[in-house]
Amino acid sequence: MKNITLIPSLVIGALFSVSAFAAELVPMEKEGFLTTSGCAAAGAFTDCYLENYVCGSDGCFETTEAGVTTKVEVVIYSHNEGHAYNVDLTAVSMASVDSSINRNEVTVVGNYDAATNTIIATEVKAPPPPKKSFFKGCL
């Protein structure tokens, strides 16, 4: 009879631990500059070379074989807070990421995990392209 009473208590304990894990994820929408962690740490936002998005650092193409890509940590840097959040982009289409990378005023929507400082993205919204200017005449 003791075994029967222990099993429900273990199941209830497991349910509480799963619900505690699920409680750590908080819905979040963050706006900022989408870049790599290396560029954000260096403060090189618009000066971030494209090789950073393939192999992770400036000049890495010299030591990395052609065609080899590595997992690059993408972050969104909030200028208002002065803080960078890691972004998990596995559930987002790469087309939306491609139009948003290395741009300001990008909005990342997803769930925030405070333990790893990661936003698990469900959507990435790029800002609209700049308006075309009209220039009449010549210089």
Image (cartoon, rainbow, N blue to C red):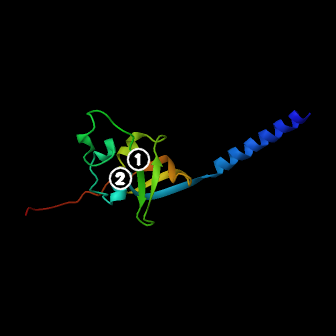
Q: Badge 2 is on which residue?
A: 38
Residue 88 visible (yes or no): yes
Q: Which SS class for mark 2?
A: helix
Q: How many marks?
A: 2
Q: Residue at the far bottom: name it.
A: 80
Q: Is 87 or 60 nearer to us in this picture? A: 60
Q: Badge 1 is on which residue?
A: 73
The numbered disc on residue 49 is none
**Does 45 sit left or right of 80 as displayed?**
left
Q: Is 94 or 14 nearer to us in this picture? A: 14
Mark 1 nearby-residue class (10 Å; few <14, some 14–19, many ≥20): some
Q: Which SS class for mark 1?
A: loop
* 55 w.r.t. 83: above or below: above
Mark 2 nearby-residue class (10 Å; few <14, some 14–19, many ≥20): many
User: The disc labelled 2 sits on which kind of residue?
Assistant: Gly
Q: Residue at the far right: name it.
A: 1
